[in-house]
Amino acid sequence: METLKIFGGNTLNGEIEVDGSKNSFLPIMAASVLCDGEIVLKRYPNLSDLIIMREILGTLNISTHVDGKTLYIDSRNSENKKITHDLTQKVRASIFILGALLGKFRSAVIAYPGGCNIGERPIDIHLKSFRTLGCRIIERHGYIYCYGENMKAGEVVLDFPSVGATESLLMCACVLEGETIIRNPAKEPEIVDLQEFINSMGGNVKGAGTDKIVINGVKSLHGTTFSVMYDRIVAGTYLLATATCGGHVLVKGVDSRHNSSLLAYLRQTACQIDVFNDKIELKADKRLSSIKRVTTMPYPFFPTDLQAPMMTLQSVSQGVCFLEETIFENRFGHVFELKKMGADIITKNRIAMIRGVDRLFGADVTATDLRAGAALVMAGMKAEGYTTIHNVDLIDRGYEKIEEKYALLGADIKRITI
Ligand code: UD1
């Protein structure tokens, strides 16, 4: 059992580096099943979700090892195996393996995925897409049995631009003979990264990041070396943390285009932002003003993964903010915890009204999901007195040694093992 113990009140100052994106690594690691070779992935962050994905690859006889910030994957002896409940429960992204196995072996058996407690998170769009391409699917006893021997390239229209469903389809269709078209795909930068990765293995995918993705299936894919994109959500969290606590921070390892909706919102608050090639500098030397309305939406709009950190900033800003969550139906778990710390928040359905208070107080709080945990760390660093954060393992899913990163910027934060 571990907790984070924070003594709040310090401003954040200095430089901080961002690693590769967890949400890009997960589908890219799954897609490595597709090739018969060695893959080298750069900017690897040591996150528990990625360790579980390595375990899943291990069950398919795919070996992995890490050297510093590089992940090596050897897919030469991959085998098709059942992915059991004990693994899929630990990480929702286990569902990506389904698309990759279907592509490579034309069959797959996988238990339903688990993941963060932020909503029902069905996988109907994934399964409907595979069915559209001719896959026979039987759902029994918590397992999904997929038979893809008659799968053919074709046109798939997604009911909603689901990130995961778009990625699953890309993985499956890139080795399916003929031309597959995905309409209404997700446009997130992680989809573009997956396209670039598949193409670097010899695939032929075009259009990621637009309304239409065109995939021309190839017979086989080869090994590659690839630098995974920077984590735009981690970068955004650091920027929001600096805006909340005050200070002057240079975030290194960021593609500012991926954070344009966040930067547009932050510019409304009167903090000073300077954007360089792969760096963003943020200076906040006074209490910031509230943003009147923030709405989470699919990319390029404001990401749901920054909703909780944004709520912490709004909790201590001057004025009132209406924050709407349109992606997940149950992503306000942090509200109850922030209120324990003195935040003034009222929620109705998926809208939160946040009246900024001039100070928060330290308290014992619990992370309800990964990003909620990141939001509570920010609140703890801002609050008066001590804050103890429980369920730190949820934070470790997406932030590597968060306490060390913030301590380097001047925060008083420690990990305590009970
Ligand atoms: C990915 C990200 C997650 C982010 C989310 C939205 C990864 C590993 N995770 O999750 O961090 O918060 O995108 O940007 O990349 N839906 C269905 N049926 C489906 C699939 C999705 O109804 O088959 C719904 C979901 O319940 C949710 C919405 O669509 O309400 C968006 O989900 P989706 O875009 O698929 O998110 P994930 O890929 O799960």
Image: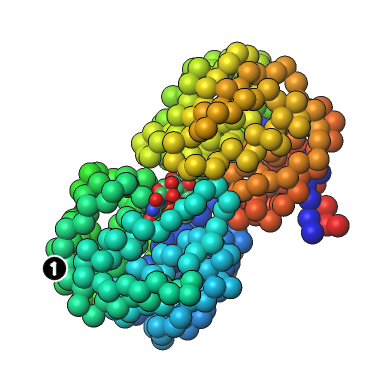
Give the secondary structure at mark 1. Answer: loop
* Screen quadrant of the N terminus: bottom right
Q: How many marks?
A: 1
Q: Is 89 displayed left or right of 178 in the figure? A: right
Quadrant housing residue 24: bottom left
Q: Is 211 displayed left or right of 121 in the figure? A: left
Quadrant housing residue 396: bottom right
Q: Residue 374 or 77: which is nearer the viewer?
A: 374
Q: Residue 205 or 139: which is nearer the viewer?
A: 139
Q: Is residue 363 above or below residue 17?
A: above
Amino acid type of disc 1? Gly
Q: Residue at x 33, y 56 (%)?
A: 125
* Screen quadrant of the C terminus: bottom right
Residue 228, image x, y percentages: 43, 56
Mark 1 burial class by Cα count in 10 Å: few <14, some 14-19, many 20+: some
Q: Is residue 133 visible?
A: yes
Q: Is residue 34 visible?
A: no
Quadrant housing residue 87: bottom right
Q: Residue furthest left?
A: 178
Q: Residue at x 61, y 61 (%)?
A: 48
Q: Residue at x 22, y 63 (%)?
A: 132
Label 1 belongs to which residue?
178
Residue 236, image x, y percentages: 53, 37
